[in-house]
Image (cartoon, helix red, strand yellow):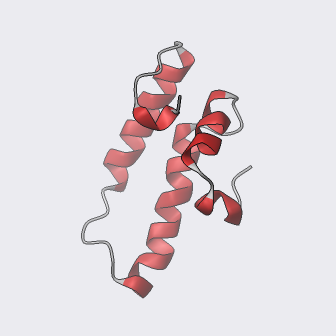
Amino acid sequence: MLDAQTAFAPIPILADGLRNGGFSSRELTGFFLKRCEELGPKYNAIVTLTADRGLQEADRADAELASGVTIALYFGP
């Protein structure tokens, strides 16, 4: 389940959630995109939010996970 603590979770914990099916890459990406949309204007820290590209990459990562391929660094050790 993605909640407020997810935003501050260490990468290995998020990687475990991806590998164990706790959430998909698309769900995790959507979670962080939503935070960017909500908090971005407050902090004025995002120049260009490429949500479509992020979701496409998330779908690719989900397909790789489903096929047993783990190549990206964010999947953890």
Please state the horizontal and vertical placement of residue 12, each as a whole percent of the image.
59, 41
Up the image or down, 63 lies above or below 40; here it is above
Is residue 14 found left or right of 62 in the rendered image? right
Q: Residue at x 40, y 84 (%)?
A: 43
Q: Residue at x 55, y 46 (%)?
A: 11
Q: Residue at x 51, y 29 (%)?
A: 62
Up the image or down, 63 lies above or below 29; here it is above
Is residue 4 found left or right of 39 in the rendered image? right
Query: How many numbered badges does the structure rendering display?
Result: 0
Q: Residue at x 30, y 56 (%)?
A: 50
Please state the horizontal and vertical placement of residue 4, each as a whole percent of the image.
68, 66
Q: Quadrant of residue 14?
A: top right
Please state the horizontal and vertical placement of residue 24, each as a whole percent of the image.
60, 37
Q: Quadrant of residue 2?
A: bottom right
Please state the horizontal and vertical placement of residue 66, each as a whole percent of the image.
56, 18
Of residues 34 and 43, the one nearer the viewer is 43
Which residue sits furthest front? 77
Which residue sits furthest right? 1
Which residue sits furthest bottom? 42
Of residues 12 and 55, the one nearer the viewer is 12
Which residue sits furthest left? 47
Of residues 16 and 31, the one nearer the viewer is 16
Up the image or down, 28 lies above or below 22; here it is below
